[in-house]
Image (cartoon, rainbow, N blue to C red):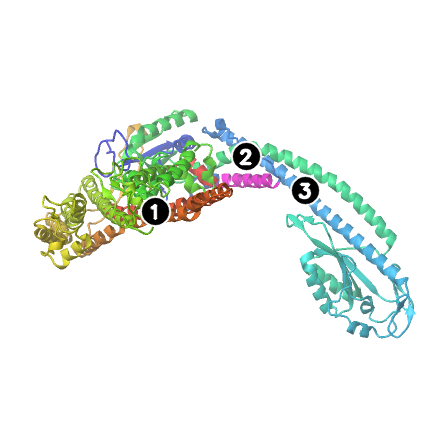
Amino acid sequence: MPSRGWGMLRARPKTTSIFRSEVMSLVQLYIPSDVARFTVSQLGEMGLVEFRDLNVDVSAFQRSFVSDVRRFDEIERKLRYLRLQIERSNVDVYDFLDEDFAGRSRGPRDIDEMEERISAHESRVLKLTAAYKSLQLKHLELVENKHVLEEVSSLFSEITGRQQQPSVARGGSIGRSGTAGSSANRYDTAPLLGRTDTSSRRSIGSMDAARAGDALAFDVEAGSAIGHDINVGFITGVISRDRISTLERVLWRSLRGNMFLNYVDIEEPIHDPKQDGPVYKSAFIVFAHGESLRDRATKIAESLGATLYHVDSSAERRQEELIDTMSRIDDLHQILENNNVARVNELTSVSEQITTWFTVVRKEKAIYHTLNLCNYDANRNCLIAEGWCASNDIAAVQSALHIATEDAGSNVPTVLQELRTTKEPPTFIRTNKFTDGFQNIVDAYGVPKAGEVNPGLFTCITFPFLFALMFGDLGHGFLMTICAGLLCFYERKLAWLAKDESMRMFYSGRYIILLMGIFSMYTGFLYNDIFSRAMGIFSSGWAWPTDAGGEGVTVEATKLGHTYAIGIDPAWHHASNSLLFTNSYKMKMSIVLGVIHMTLGICLQVPNALHFKKRINILHVFVPQIIFLFSIFGYLVFTILFKWSTDWYARDASGELTHVSPPSLLNMLIYMFLSPGNVNESERMFRGQAVLQTFLLLIALVCVPWMLLVKPLILRREHRKIISEGYGRISTHVRVSAEDDTMGGAVVLTEQEEMEEDDFDFADIMINQSIHTIEFCLNSISNTASYLRLWALSLAHAQLSEVLWTMTFLPTLKMSGAIQPIAIMCGFSVWFTLTFGILIGMEGLSAFLHALRLHWVEFNNKFYDGTGVKFEPFSFKAILDEAEE
């Protein structure tokens, strides 16, 4: 019977834990062709199997089910088109999912009926949309034509009115439109783009320039000249308002001034179906002399996107055409409304089912993508699939296969067997909504290898705790806890936040924020800080004198016979030397907690070594590392605790000090290396300190060659032993399953693996071990110093909170008079806003990032590889969630 597990015989675990990844099994499925769709569909609903691609050498266009994938791609395209039309028509989409249809395995008839309905809807919507666009284009032409007619009629009326009044031209001649004198002189005195404004009408050029001095007068209506026949014509049209100035310049320079242009801006925007939106346009008319100039003006206008319209020179015909145009516009309005109602009704019927159709199509396309990963045996009419699944879930997979066989109405079941393999399985760690956020923090650094200790278990506690050490304030922690608690309590109602890109991070990390707030309340209680104020919950261990002091006088508190029950005594908050005390306290606390945190990381090498059966890592990696760390920084932690527990100002019966002044631990650690075996008498903490420091230093020095040389030498000795016994080369082997009567005598290739030759390179091992040894020795110093960020950010947070209170809210409490209530309200508003925005928002983000660094760099690199591959099972839920995003 094939083994279950990864590379070795092992018992199937009874329970699951976040401490390690799940034990994975490589399973092989023999699926009859008529059951294939139902089987993959059922497995997709459960999301338990990650399928392997057995057709790596086959291109995507040559696989068995590529035509089915294209079919559903086309259906999905139609659905996207329908959804786009629904959005453009502002039709409400019913967020309704037909679970009876989308949640079960569907047969070919169901899919064909759905495809027919979608195609019919698309065809009707296409026809209605095409007709609607055609009608809109016609409506656009009529509206533009109406504005052109109105503009031309207005211009002709204005010109005719001017011609009926006497005018004086240069040279003294008087007539209807006298032109005595040279028209060139009049042209020379005109500006390059001269305009005559009459309300919104603007013009360029002159009629005299257009006639080029060949006529005495021009009857616009009749189109004839008085005295001479001339050939002056005009073109009319509509152009976008932002291009009218370009049209002016190009016409003026191209026609060399032999033109007259007049235009008016159309006040209301015109809906242009080509641009799918309102466009501001202008109606224009251009007079030019000669057919060639008019043709040139026509080409220029059309090249700039103008639409030209023919307008009759007769006023009566223009009036008739205007009335007819307005009548046709009214009729077209009614037709457009009827067409729009029909489109909206059609799209409304589609909107009721489009969510269900999208879900089904995406599921079906995913099914055929998965079937393309399988090998197809045409002779036996079955599919061969391989995939990873958790060993605990094999029973559930077998149950799903049985259900799929029943749904398909087949008598031939799908056969499942487990394969023995040396392939490294994907990493599957079961999480819930509480642990998922912490596991994401770990996965962002690197996914654990299969069987490797998962830092996510410890991160659930250590991450919010280290955050709270930097953010410790009872008030700020309470506000953070309230916000996170509301997110957790109303998580179902606020699930829409997960779809918002800016709020997704806060919603998915709501339980992380909740724990960070709770731990911040705890550390704030120990720091005795609530919005930078002290809390006198218990009896203080210090008493301030009542009969001394005053402004500018320094007094000393008297120590009582007891200490404060929990946390820092509130008396320190009012002392002038409180910063010195809290600095020393938090700095030493950061070192102690940092060494404990790193020690935990080093100790986790032991379960890793036991699991992977590498006991050499325990004796020659873990042991020298822990000894090295304890010889230096463990001793530092011991001296910190010793200094805390010693009363350096205690006196004996004669009143003499029993100890010298408190030593400087930093100087002690420095001179431990610079002057081993010597301790200044004023810095001595206990008897035999110099001997102990020398001994610890020698042990630390011995650990360096221990870590560097012992493991590589042992590995070389074992390798030589293997070579001498003749096991140096292992040939390539191919595993093929034997004939099995239960599978109809099928002989199937189950696994083909190549055991690579054991390439042992002592030089590479030595280089790698040297890098790890140097890195560990140097990082022991830098990582310990890195934990001082706990002290630095805690100090910054406390001081900034004090500044905000002192500068914004405290002055309002000292005011008097009728303005005090208003000042208190304003001061509180400013203080509360800055507290939320700066102390909770910005400071919280800063503490979060620093806690993240302490876990990724100082903790994880002690034991964690993070080179695994995440288990990504074939799951409809994951596919649909990704599609929605």
| Residue of label 2 | 354
Camera-side residue: 337 or 602?
602
- The quarter of the picture where the N terminus appears is top left
Q: Amino acid at mark 3?
A: Tyr
In depth, the one of 394 and 531 nearer the eye is 531
Foreground residue, 444 or 48?
Answer: 444
Label 3 close to label 1 by CB (< 8 Å)? no
- 419 in the magenta segment: no
Residue 652 left/right relative to 436: left
Q: Identity of the amino acid at label 1?
A: Ala
Instruction: Choose the circle earlier in sequence order: 1 or 2.
Output: 2
Q: Which residue is mark 1?
A: 798
From the viewer's perspective, is 843 left or right of 342? left
Q: How busy is the neighbourhood of tag 1: few (under 14 within 10 Å), some, or many (20 plus)?
A: many
On the image, the x and y values in percent for residue 86 come to 59, 38
| Image coords of residue 179 (percent x, y) | 87, 70
Q: Which residue is mark 3?
A: 132
Q: Is residue 744 visible?
A: no
Query: From mark 1 to mark 2, how far is it between C-alphas?
Result: 55 Å
Residue 605 got which mark?
none
For marks 3 and 1, the one nearer the N-term is 3
Relative to residue 659, is residue 874 depicted above or below? above
Query: How many discs mark residues in the rendered view?
Result: 3
| Residue 831: percent from left, percent from top | 44, 45
Residue 792: x and y, percent?
30, 50
**Identity of the residue drawn at 51% across and 36% down:** 358
For residue 74, say whether it is visible.
yes
Magenta-drawn segment: 69-88
Secondary structure category for the residue under label 1: helix
